[in-house]
Amino acid sequence: MAIRSTEDHVEALRPRVREYTPDELATMLASRTDVVVIDVREVQELIDLGVIPGSRHVPRGMLEFWADPAMTYYREFFSGDREIVVHCAAGQRSVLAAIALQDMGYPRVAHLAGGFTAWVAAGHPVEPAPAASKWARRP
């Protein structure tokens, strides 16, 4: 059996996830208070490139643990009454993350089409990420 490429795997899963364009997400963030943006990129990506203002960083490897109310890792910004929009750099990891949240029972989950790269290309605001992380590269 041939191993399917990651790209093919993500493309096969993509129809299961609602997708917002950068402009749609920007409009939502400006007009609604029930939306939380989850950034699943690696911490160095945040430090090097910045973040969507107001987004919450959740390392992809910790997503399910931080989203589970029964875990000590749980983060309060995960809530079934909020719409969760996940993003990564280009829109592949976010598809996998969104499906994981859907499978956990979160009812309103979507991802950002094209990820952070598309957000920046569309001219939407970016703010610096805190550079105090012990994981950050040092000059």
Image (cartoon, rainbow, N blue to C red):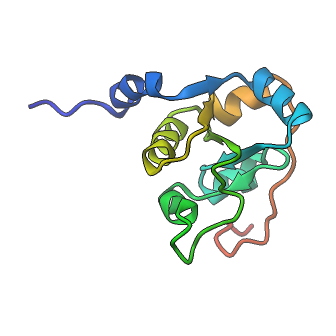
| Residue 102 place in picture, x, y as percent | 48, 42
Residue 31 to residue 139: above or below? above
Which residue is situated farthest in the left direction here? 1
Residue at 19 percent of width and 34 percent of height? 3
The N terminus, quarter of image: top left
User: Quarter of the image holding residue 121?
Assistant: top right
Residue 129 to residue 100: above or below? below
User: Quarter of the image holding residue 5?
Assistant: top left
The residue closer to the viewer here, 31 or 19, is: 31
The residue closer to the viewer here, 134 or 119, is: 119
Residue 58 to residue 5: above or below? below
The residue closer to the viewer here, 2 or 68, is: 68
Side (left or right) of 56 relative to 102: right
Residue at 66 percent of width and 54 percent of height? 79
The residue closer to the viewer here, 59 or 138, is: 59
| Residue 77 place in picture, x, y as percent | 71, 58
Q: Does residue 54 show up?
A: yes
Side (left or right) of 12 relative to 56: left
Q: Does residue 113 show up?
A: no
Residue at 64 percent of width and 33 percent of height? 115
Residue at 71 percent of width and 45 percent of height? 82
Residue 53 to residue 122: above or below? below
| Residue 59 place in picture, x, y as percent | 57, 58
| Residue 90 place in picture, x, y as percent | 59, 32
